[in-house]
Amino acid sequence: MRILSTDPDEPGIFAIGQVATGVFAFGQMATGVIAIGQLARGVVAVGQLAVGFVAIGQACYSVVWGGGMVGLTGRGFGFVLKTLPKYRPDRGAPEGWARLGTLMDVREKGIGTVRARVCGRALLGEDGLPLDVQVNADIANQLSTIGDSKAVVQLVRDDIQDVDRGTYREAPQVQRVLNVMSVTPWKLWPWPFEAITGTGCSPLWQLLIRAFFLLAMIVGWHFIVGQTIIDMFR
């Protein structure tokens, strides 16, 4: 293998030409570990038509990640068909609840969901300190039935005006109180992958279909460019 190659039949560490084959390939038809050209094939490919594990182009075929006007990709952007599921480790809240966040998020947005630990009739944060929330009698009874375990808590902010602290020159102070609306035991998804519909955990049959597509795309990449790259290093 040459350091710099302009010969289509001789690969190089750096390959330049109309037909270029090398570790770093630049040309109209480029094939390499990193390939840039009108027709780019490689591990990382950028071009009008790009094929790779990572590929960006007007039309792209990428196993892991890519982007383009049209294409078949694992994950990516553009008008592409995505074969890999979205990784969503934060989706531990029941369907219909707000996504998991922090007390600060609830104070800003007015509603939210946080993780907590149930200890008797009290709710503790992940740091082990009591949560600064209001628990009514019904919720307190529910907490006692859940027992000592992790839980997901739905909170709603209530803005209360403290009229006693206001004067004729100053508006009453507003106190933000976080009320517990509902509590449910923490249930992890079997796996942190989102379903095709975009809500909830991906069922096993969807993961199996996606795994089949992933294997098919790896095989397709191997026949399109993988064998050429392997032969280049022999």
Image (cartoon, rainbow, N blue to C red):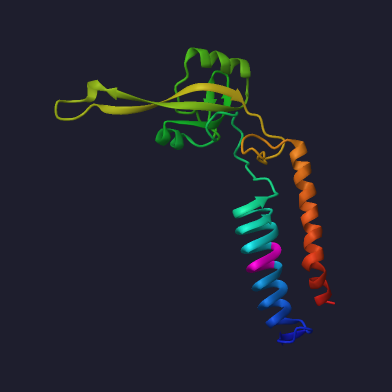
Q: Quadrant of residue 220?
A: bottom right
Q: Quadrant of residue 97?
A: top right
Left or right: residue 217 versus residue 28 is: right
226 shown above or below 206:
below
Q: Quadrant of residue 166?
A: top left
Q: Which residue is more in the foreground, 155 or 217? A: 217
List x then y, in percent, for residue 65. 66, 57
Marks counted in the figure total 0
List x then y, in percent, for residue 187. 66, 29
List x then y, in percent, for residue 32. 72, 73
List x then y, in percent, for residue 193. 67, 41
Residue 23 drawn in magenta:
no
Left or right: residue 215 versus residue 4 is: right
Q: Main secondary structure of the magenta part?
A: strand
25 shown above or below 108:
below
For the N terminus, the quadrant is: bottom right
173 shown above or below 226:
above
Q: Which residue is more in the foreground, 92 or 81? A: 81
Rendered residue at 72%/85% (across/down): 3
Rendered residue at 70%/49% (across/down): 84
Rendered residue at 69%/56% (across/down): 64
As drawn, the residue found furthest toward the left would be 168
Q: Which residue is more in the foreground, 22 or 108? A: 22
Rendered residue at 73%/74% (across/down): 31
Residue range of the region highlighted in magenta in the rendering: 44-53
For the C terminus, the quadrant is: bottom right
